[in-house]
Image (cartoon, rainbow, N blue to C red):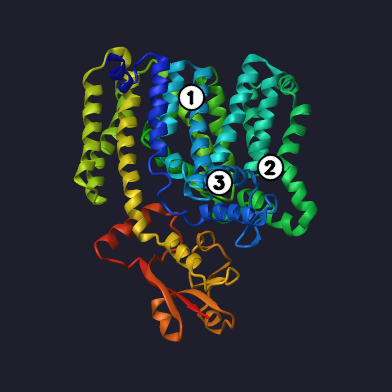
Amino acid sequence: MKNLLQCFQITAPHKIQVRYIMLLITALYLFNFHVNDIWTPNESFYAESVREMFETGNFIDIQYNYRPRYNKPPLTYWAIALSSSIFGLNEFGIRLPIILMALGSIWLTYLLGKKLYSPKAGLYAMCIMAVSVQLIAVKQYASPEVPLTFFFTLTMYWFIRAYTENRNKYYYLAYIALGLTVLTKGYPYIIVIGGIIGFYLLLDNQFNLKVWFKKLLQIKLHIGLPIVLIIGLSWVIYMYLTYGQDFWEIFQHETFERAFTRDEKSMRPFFYVEVISWTILPYSLAFFVALGYYLFNYKNIRKELGFAFSWFLVMFIIFTAAKGKIPTYFIQAHPPMALILTAFLINKPDISKPFRLIKQYSFLLPGLIILGASFALVYIFSLSVIWYTVPLLSSVLIFSILRHHRKNEVQSQMIAVPFYAIIGAYILLGAYLKPLEQFRPYKGIGEIINSNENIDKDTPLQIDGTLIHNMPFYAERKVIRQDTLVNIIQYTQPTLALIREEHMNEFKDVEVLWEGYIYDFASESQFAKFIKASLKAEKGDYSDFAVFKLIYRQ
């Protein structure tokens, strides 16, 4: 019982504590991760491309909706295909590798904290990384952000082990991991990771260029770069030799020009400051306090957090300078942010009493606010009253932690309060994922189509004036998305179409196979807007939805 209480308070013996926290995080990440239909749009590209891989037996030439998809390298597709071959081509099999790589990224953050500082630091970094809002938001949807984070962090872990232990085998493992990073998202990440390592070597050697150059020779670039290029560019070379300029123009635009070619509209120097303000909630406020402390006491940076600071700073500069600015681009900076915040806790800087209070409340206050908001979530989501037990239990646990602590356990308290508060909120959000499916009828539409023996597999599905990216996956056929009403009317072959209700008077002698509401906004990826629309629909306001009818005409 004593060990259990210590586990809750994050003060248990290290191995016991790590097992408990990792088990809790794993349970959170697995909770209801497979209950939603394939999410539109980005997840749809990966799910459908993998389905077509199995359909054609070709796992190299990636297609979506039966057209070549040159946009991204193949490693995420292959990971999903491997999982689906074991667990089935369904939401569970498609999302499982993403969940596992998210957990792997959390574990690597723990190992980095343990390596750079102490076992307790690793534990704190693990907690911060695990509950960050942005990672939770993408942890279960099939897209390259989480695999990229995993291989990126793996590269950094092997590098710092090689550099601090002076062991060549770890350099080679780092280069293999970098090659896999490139095979996940593209060759610009050679520049990003190379910039981080190059700047860290400068910082660690006090900007002595002579020593820096010697360090560059020690990291085996002459062996490592060929390893990276062979692994990372193998698919690119194959695709260029097969498809030539058609492939290269799209791939180059998606992997380099879209991110790094500047225009005036990309001049948003504070974009990622705004992102940081929420992306690692509930620890964002504390991160700004920690970063402010280190920038003011810059002499401590090299000694206390040179590696993490180099990682964060180079990413911040590169992605601020880049044309493409999307919050998910910064997920790979979550590990160093967790490490910077951890260093701020572990190193116990000598600061004045007012700043100590600011430091303490920058952790505790967001946690207490989130705790209060959790009670409101049960009401807002119209969940059963039984779900009020989640914020109640969180409250009991948090106030127990606040009440029973010793002076040397304040650090654990500052980590534990926001950690448990936001886990409670995530459990409630996970509980709402299942009711949310009543407003996502895509799988049901696909089942109706595929169970109808009169509909030939070669008959495409035409969609009246909107984009529904996951319908190729569920309909298991080519889909003409955002088709015009005129094209559908004039189609001379057997017609299978999703038609807006107001256009139905244009069609005669058709069989209506299904009718219902479909979300009528550009994308479900703006999750908060979709939840808001769904909550309104639960109360009878379907203003964000449109009535569609699935028709078939022979």
Judged left or right of residue 264, residue 30 is left
Residue under pointer 1: 110
Q: Which residue is mark 3?
A: 84
Q: Position of residue 317 (x, y in %)?
A: 57, 39
Query: Are discs 3 and 1 less than 8 Å apart at CB?
Result: no
Q: Earlier in the sequence, mark 3 or mark 1?
A: 3
Measured Cα–Cα span from mark 2 to mark 3: 27 Å
Q: Secondary structure at mark 1?
A: helix
Q: Residue at coordinates 73% horizontally, 47% vertically from top-left? A: 236
Marks 1 and 2, how far apart in space? 27 Å
In the rendered view, would you say 542 is above or below 238?
below
Whole-percent x, y for residue 381 in the image: 27, 51
160 or 318: nearer the viewer: 160
Q: Does residue 208 sit above or below 77 in this rendering?
A: above
Gap between marks 3 and 1 measured at Cα: 29 Å
Say which mark, if any, is on residue 187.
2
Q: Quadrant of the N terminus?
A: top left
Q: Residues within 10 Å of mark 1 (few under 14, many from 20)?
A: many
> Can see residue 129?
yes
The three-letter amino acid code for the residue at tag 3 is Ser
Q: Residue 387, how many percent across, how many down?
A: 23, 42
Name the element at disc 3: helix
Say which of marks 2 and 3 sits in front.
3
Whichever of labels 1 and 2 marks the residue nearer the N terminus, that label is: 1
Q: Nearer the viewer, mark 1 or mark 2?
A: 1
- The 10 Å Cα crowd at callout 3, few under 14, some 14 to 19, many 20 or more, is many
Question: Which mark is nearer the camera, 3 or 1?
Answer: 3
Name the amino acid, label 1.
Answer: Tyr
Per the image, label 2 sits on a secondary structure element best described as loop
Which is nearer the eye, 292 or 526?
Answer: 526
